[in-house]
């Protein structure tokens, strides 16, 4: 039986998600927006019976058993943790910090019977599902290099908001880079242990953001990751990622995996391959059909992936008669909250590297840091 859904958010993802959910048979019972006006507008547009700007009204709604959270990163942890505590299944976007991610992991471990997955839709894109299968079958031989390029227009909103602030989760690294970090772990089956990165903010003001306000979130990012390596004769997989959001009117999304006997390349939503010695690339998977309403704010790979994720959710919940019960098989490829913590740890390591100019180790926290640690150190120094 499909659960009733409550959606948090009124941005581009929520606007696409609601009709996709309805197309798969889900009933969207409640919608949350940062303001009553935003919530009311989207609710009327998509025929959602209840809307509010109070989070508890959605979480406590008697017909809501699945919560989809697509809101600013700084707010994600609070809603996700509370939703699990109330007994709701959760699909959510990334949090703002590794500490927030760790708190989400703790909540998910405390309620293992509930669905708790991150909304990285690239894992569900058919091109990447096929790429992972071919990599496991040895199409490229031993994996050596991953090279990723994501180019597109500015990620900034029309007015000053969280997308402008690095500390609130804005910027290309956090917004797009986190999806790529998770995707590379999914494809290679390995995790980064050292990273090196460079972040820049080339557009600090524009026609709409000016005066005393300045953009602090990055619009260009380049980073390298050393992944795996413990059991590999070659020392693991070397990954390079370039993110450039200073290219209005265009969008490039290319993921290449090079190995000892060949290579695989996902361009947009299509998959190509070439074995060493062959004359050229072959098209292994073409883009088939429409995934839903086209929106300029959502790149096609994410749109197709979101559609595939919603289909997987339907299959997961349809397998059980009880509304809150779900089957793991259909959503087994989805990133867990633990994966979200790993991704956020890598993001913060890349930021540290950009400041230090050095390679940084990726060390995933195993316990929540003491919030009074810095205060205690300061008091100790004063005492001495």
Image (cartoon, rainbow, N blue to C red):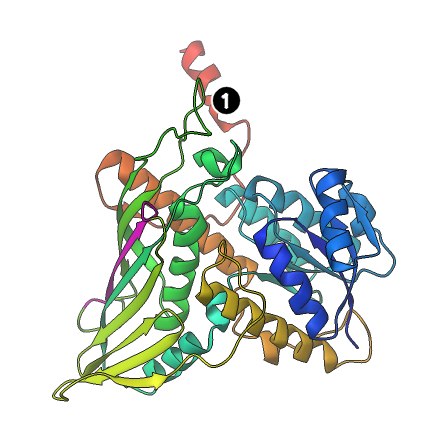
* Residue for point 57% across, 39% down: 74
| 302 shown above or below 375 | below
Question: In the rendered picture of this protein, how many numbered marks are placed on residues?
Answer: 1
Q: Which residue is mark 1?
A: 376
The image position of residue 16, as x and y in percent, is: 61, 61
Q: Indicate whether residue 14 is drawn in magenta.
A: no
The answer to whether residue 153 is left or right of residue 51 is: left
What residue do we see at 36% from left, 39% from top? 218
Q: Secondary structure at mark 1?
A: helix
Q: Is residue 112 left or right of residue 281?
A: right
Picture coordinates of residue 193, whole percent (x, y): 31, 56
Dominant secondary structure (helix, strand or loop) of the stretch shown in magenta: strand
Q: Position of residue 177 (x, y in %)?
A: 39, 53
Seen from the viewer's position, the closer of residues 326 and 287 is: 287
Q: Residue at x 67, y 80 (%)?
A: 315
Comparing 86 with 47, the one in front is: 47
Does residue 243 show up magenta in the picture? yes
Would you place residue 285 above or below residue 33 in this image?
below
Q: Quadrant of the N terminus?
A: bottom right
Q: Badge 1 local density, few (<14 within 10 Å), some, or many (20+)?
A: few
As drawn, 371 above or below 334: above
Q: On the rendered structure, is 291 left or right of 49?
A: left
Quarter where residue 88 is shown: bottom right
Magenta stretch? 235-247
Residue 239 position in % (x across, y down): 26, 61
Q: Is residue 84 visible?
A: no
Q: Nearer the viewer, residue 203 or 375?
A: 203
> From this viewpoint, is residue 22 visible?
yes
> Where the C terminus falls, by quadrant?
top left
């Amino acid at each position: 039986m499909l659960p009733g859904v409550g959606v948090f958010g009124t941005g581009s993802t929520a606007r696409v998600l609601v009709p996709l959910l309805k197309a798969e048979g889900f009933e969207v019972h409640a919608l949350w927006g940062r303001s009553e006006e935003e919530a009311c507008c989207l609710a009327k547009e998509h025929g959602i019976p209840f809307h509010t700007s109070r989070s508890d009204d959605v979480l406590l709604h008697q017909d809501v058993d699945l919560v989809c959270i697509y809101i600013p990163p700084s707010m994600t942890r609070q809603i996700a943790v509370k939703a699990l505590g109330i007994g709701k299944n959760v699909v959510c976007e990334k949090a703002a910090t590794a500490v927030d991610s760790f708190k989400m992991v703790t909540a998910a471990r405390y309620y293992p019977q509930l669905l708790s997955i991150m909304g990285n839709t690239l894992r569900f894109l058919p091109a990447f599902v096929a790429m992972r299968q071919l990599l496991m079958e040895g199409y490229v031989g031993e994996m050596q290099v991953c090279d990723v390029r994501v180019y597109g227009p500015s990620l900034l909103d029309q007015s000053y908001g969280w997308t402008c602030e690095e500390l609130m989760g804005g910027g290309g690294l956090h917004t797009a880079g986190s999806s790529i970090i998770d995707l590379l772990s999914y494809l290679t089956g390995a995790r980064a242990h050292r990273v090196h990165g460079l972040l820049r903010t080339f557009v600090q003001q524009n026609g709409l953001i000016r005066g005393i306000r300045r953009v602090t979130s990055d619009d260009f990012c380049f980073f390298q990751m050393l992944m795996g390596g413990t059991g590999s004769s070659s020392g693991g997989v070397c990954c390079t990622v370039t993110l450039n959001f200073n290219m209005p009117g265009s969008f490039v999304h290319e993921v290449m995996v090079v190995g000892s006997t060949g290579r695989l390349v996902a361009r947009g939503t299509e998959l190509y391959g070439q074995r060493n010695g062959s004359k050229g690339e072959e098209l292994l998977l073409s883009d088939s059909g429409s995934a839903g309403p086209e929106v300029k704010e959502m790149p096609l790979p994410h749109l197709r992936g979101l559609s595939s994720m919603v289909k997987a959710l339907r299959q997961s919940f349809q397998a059980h008669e009880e509304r809150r019960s779900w089957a793991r098989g259909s959503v087994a490829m989805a990133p867990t909250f633990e994966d979200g913590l790993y991704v956020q740890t890598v993001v913060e390591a890349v930021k540290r590297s950009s400041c230090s100019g050095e390679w940084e180790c990726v060390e995933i926290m195993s316990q929540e840091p003491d919030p009074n640690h810095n205060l205690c150190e300061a008091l100790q120094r004063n005492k001495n």
